[in-house]
């Protein structure tokens, strides 16, 4: 089992920045990928960014260079730096981590609200 604690969400004006953090504990030795999804009201959950233990990253097209995912393996923590936030980035952001080729463990979610 892996437990996740997310932090860093909040209210920010359009064009501003936030950094989300997600710390994993428990059976962290099994983790191969760490990443972020988001879900806006009335919409399906969508992938934002993923990073693997070998440093490979994958971003959703809507990120368009505004977000950066990184990880600290010693701390079993994944970060999402979000710059140039837009109103449409408002959502609950969920951390997910998991073993290779297997479903992941999900965090409780952190709210990001972008205001005009």
Image (tube, helix red, strand yellow):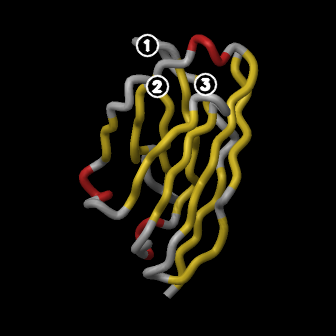
Going by the picture, which residue comes out furthest to the bottom?
116
Instruction: Establish if 89 lies above or below 103.
Output: below
Element marked by disc 3: strand
Of the pair 39 and 85, the residue shown nearer to us: 85
User: Which residue bears the numbered disc 1?
Assistant: 100
Report how far apart the C-alphas of labels 1 and 2 lie in the structure. Answer: 7 Å
**Residue at x 33%, y 31% (from the top left corner):** 56
Q: Percent position (x, y) of residue 80?
A: 50, 52
Instruction: Establish if 82 lies above or below 61.
Output: below
Q: Percent position (x, y) of residue 115?
A: 54, 82
**Residue at x 40%, y 74% (from the top left corner):** 84
Report how far apart the C-alphas of labels 2 and 3 lie in the structure. Answer: 10 Å
Element marked by disc 2: strand
| Badge 1 vs badge 2, beta-carbon distance below 8 Å | yes
Q: Give the number of the disc on residue 33.
A: 2
Q: Mark 1 Cα within 10 Å, few/some/many (few <14, many 20+)?
A: few
Q: Percent position (x, y) of residue 6?
A: 69, 46
Q: Percent position (x, y) of residue 109?
A: 65, 47
């Amino acid at each position: 089992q892996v437990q996740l604690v997310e932090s860093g969400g909040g209210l920010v004006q359009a064009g501003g920045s936030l950094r989300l953090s997600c710390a994993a504990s428990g059976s962290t030795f099994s983790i191969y990928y760490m990443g972020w999804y988001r879900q806006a009201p009335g919409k399906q959950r969508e992938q934002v960014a993923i990073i693997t233990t070998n440093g490979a990253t994958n971003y959703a097209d809507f990120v368009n260079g505004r977000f950066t995912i990184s990880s600290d393996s010693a701390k079993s923590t994944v970060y999402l730096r979000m710059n140039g936030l837009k109103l449409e980035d408002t959502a609950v952001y969920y951390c997910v981590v998991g073993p290779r080729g297997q479903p992941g463990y999900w965090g409780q979610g952190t709210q990001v609200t972008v205001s005009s």
